Image (cartoon, rainbow, N blue to C red):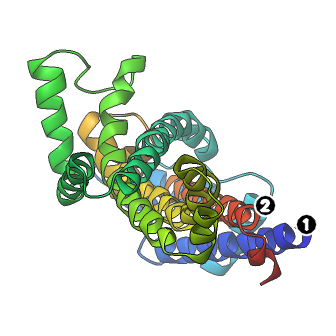
Amino acid sequence: MIRFVLRRLISAFIVLFIVASVTFFVLNLTGDPVTAVLQGTGASQEEIAALKSKLGYDRPIIVRYGDFLWAMAHGDFGESIRFGQPSIDMVMERLPYTLMLGGAAIAIIVALGLPLGILAAVFKDSWFDRCVSAATGLAQSVPHFVVGPLLILFFAVMLKWLPVSGGATTSSIVLPASTLALYPMALVTRVLRASMLDTIEQDYVLTAQAKGLSHPAIVARHMVRNALLPALTVISLQVIAMIGGTIVVESIFGWPGLGSFARDTLLASDFPLAQTIIVFVAGAVVTINLVTDIVYALVDPRIRLQ
């Protein structure tokens, strides 16, 4: 197991290195960020040149790339061109909000998606199963930019139960987290239901039935555990997809996280800040994949041997 984790850690480090390198060249080959940021602010050519010299944008790109990697290895992600503050500090101010939003969405997916999928399979073709199938189908057909405003209209404007936007109160997270979780929760429910139904025909389930085990015991001991791997795959992929969805959801609800911040930063050509956000997001994706692989190995020991 230790060798398995070490191999995954090395792979994660290589992926992060590639993402950071590609991000640096893609952003820095598109133009001069200092001129783009200061253009229209009334800054003189001397002031622009001075800021370029201070941030190192007057040097060859390959030299800046070496400095970027060396500084990043020491935890220094540079200084924001717009705000004049360390990029890492600004990202860390926003990161907790995005983590809270993502964590709340994952909690909703796990708390509702898994039980609904299991119960829909157990009560196959019942009214409950049909209601779950209809609801999940509807949830998968409506995008974030439609769900968000509808939830605001119903729960915030008409019923006045929840805040319209912002992150000032604890209840502010309910609507954006629900919007973010709706599609992946529906997908997890459907995948787990199908996976559970597939396990019913397996030999080990038939053997358990022949031994006289009760239906709840067969479901809990044999069906759920073996049906869980496809659902874990979907959850991990959907969590990664949710990172992109946070840009839309945070913008709709005015949530002060990294998603809306990344959008504003890229539009403003603030490359040091954009690089920091992208590296952090890539780190989150790599970490999720790493955790998923480890969970896979724990659930199914054959994966460690492959």
Marks counted in the figure total: 2
Residue shown at 63%/70% (left/top)?
207
Establish if 23 lies above or below 274: below
Tag 1 residue: 2
> For this rendering, which residue is in front, 153 or 192?
192
Q: Is residue 92 visible?
A: yes
> For this rendering, which residue is in front, 164 or 128?
128
In the image, residue 36 lies at what x, y percent?
Answer: 36, 60
Badge 2 amino acid: Ala
Is 269 positioned to the left or the right of 62 in the image?
left
In the image, residue 200 lies at what x, y percent?
Answer: 48, 68
In the image, residue 129 lies at what x, y percent?
Answer: 27, 52
Residue shown at 42%/61% (left/top)?
241
User: What's the mark number on residue 31?
Assistant: none
Which numbered disc, 1 or 2, marks the residue that appears first in the sequence? 1
Badge 1 amino acid: Ile
Q: Residue furthest bottom?
A: 306
Q: Residue furthest right?
A: 2
On-image quarter of the C terminus: bottom right
Establish if 18 lies above or below 121: below
Tag 2 residue: 73
Q: Is residue 282 visible?
A: no
> For this rendering, which residue is in front, 71 or 180?
180
In the image, residue 243 lies at what x, y percent?
Answer: 45, 55
- Structural crowding at the residue carrying mark 2, measured as other residues with C-alpha within 10 Å and reported as few (<14), some (14–19) or many (≥20): few
- Secondary structure type for disc 2: helix
